[in-house]
Amino acid sequence: MNISHKATLILLLSFIFTCAKADVVVVVSATSTVNSLTKNQVSNIFLGKTSSFPNGDKAIAIDQKDGSSEWIDFYKKVSGKSDSQLKSYWATLIFSGRKQPPKQLADSSEVKKSISSNPSQISYIAEETVDSSVKVVLKP
Amino acid sequence: MNKFRFTVITTALLVTSQADAINLGYDVNFKAFGTLGLVYSDNDGADYVTSTHAQATGAGKTDTVSYKVDSKLGAQFDWQANEKLSLSTQFLTKHYEDNTWTPRIESAFLKYVVASELDIRAGRIRPPVFNLSDFLDVNFANLWVRPPIEHYSAVPFTYMNGADLLWSTQSGEIAWLVQPYTGQAKVDNAWENTNDSDVVGLNIRAGRGNFTFRAGYAQTRFRVSGATIDYALNALYGLCQNDPVACDLANKIDSKDAKATYFSLGGNWDNGDYFILGEWSKSDLNVGFFPEMQSWYLSGGVRIKSWTPYITYAKTKDASSIYSRSSNPYTNGIINEMHNGVMQGQHSISSGVRYDFMQNIALKAQWDHIKTDCKGSQADTCGGVFANMSSGFSDEPQDAEVISLSIDFIY
């Protein structure tokens, strides 16, 4: 293995490492009464199975752009469902008229802006974008 | 005309790219679903249909290969008036029991958020009589080419005009949905035309992690009428003097008020890679000689990347014990004759594969091996879930090999 190959390998590994580090965390407003949630509880809120937090307060799920790395990572870890499974799942709720899917926002900063001003909202952002405006309630 | 419908469905499929609903402005969203399907049946003695209530002709006798069994197109408009109030309307066109494709309004309701966990809906609603009833036509949302017909053809209506409550709540790790509903539906009464019927029911779901459990109960009250009923009634009153069984039956029918109950239990387990789902139901139509039907299915499969192979066993049987219950052979003759006209005993083994080749489009192929079941040696009891039967078809057990190919999409 010559030097340039080694360099490529290191670059590749560091790239993979960076990608792997871009984990999503589940967040609520810093002023929310909710401090921690389980994977199941989060999954129930995002799959429209409940619209309140375990303490009874109103919960509004906010999604990132469908197909974004945060979206894929979040649903894979929290619900164990793939892209097309989620589409099938939501089709059952949309066309039976029971529920509409969560509102989607463009990126982590849009999500933070929305969440910090509404203590009912819950969403997920890349871990490194967490700041004092939001509170992490689950690292899936 | 049929060619035109076909083109509409094809065009709708072709313009479908990414699965984002179109916002038409004024907070109105447009969404759609559809299926383009071909079905082959090797039994030309009758037509394979998705339900004997919903379709009068299909594959086998009318056409060896038919696009009419599964093809359909649904369109839905959702309007969010404000944070609490929304309006939803769904149109559906498919090959209906009157052999037309005239679009029908499957749902049109106002939904109001009463509290964070409680919604109320009023208008035209698809009641969840069985597990998949309220999205039965959205084939993309279901695993198979179509939900098992042995089970789903038991319910003779798809929508009602009425109201329901949706209470979704969470206790610990369990998510609950409790949904009572009531309204009026047009119910197929099997001997004559459709009738207005009062419907009342309750749907309960509980989910935790990979498990979902569901129970449902529905009751309909409808009027029994028509020439066939009048004929039976006259004959039974004629026998009344010598046979108390005939009297009892005649009085029951003469009230013209029939109650049908549908009870169902089901569940599924899905860990993302493997899944198993099933449902059992008991449909009891308390009109003297109407059968008590039981049906169930069990299905399982595995997800391998975009491919989902699956197998299903489904069965529906007549569980009534009304045969020859009188000592009078004439009374028994009438009971059996009326009863036989509505027989649906059948079982099938299916295997198929779903291929999710785009985020919102799935291709499916399925093979069904169907056998109809007779009630002992009684003639005219082996009809199964088939329509448009040739004479003699229901006199002996039938076999059918059915092969289906379909493309399902949502938009």
Image: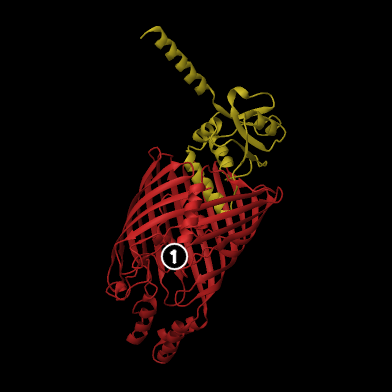
Q: Compare residues A69 and B132 and report the one nearer the observer.
A: A69
According to the image, what is the colour scheme of the structure?
by chain
Label count reads 1
Q: Is residue A28 visible?
A: no
What is the quadrant of residue B59 in the picture? bottom left
Q: Residues within 10 Å of mark 1 (few under 14, many from 20)?
A: many
Provide the chain ID for the residue under circle 1. Answer: B
In the displayed structure, does residue A33 sit left or right of residue A19? right
Specify whether residue B58 is in view. yes
In the figure, the red chain has which letter?
A: B
Q: What is the display colour for chain A?
A: yellow
Amino acid type at mark 1: Ala
**Image coordinates for residue A23, horizontal then vertical, percent:** 54, 26
- Looking at the image, is A121 positioned above or below residue B52? above
Residue placed under numbered mark 1 in the picture? B154
Residue at 49% over, 18% down: A15
Residue A24: x percent and y percent? 56, 28
**Nearest the eye: B312 or B69:** B69
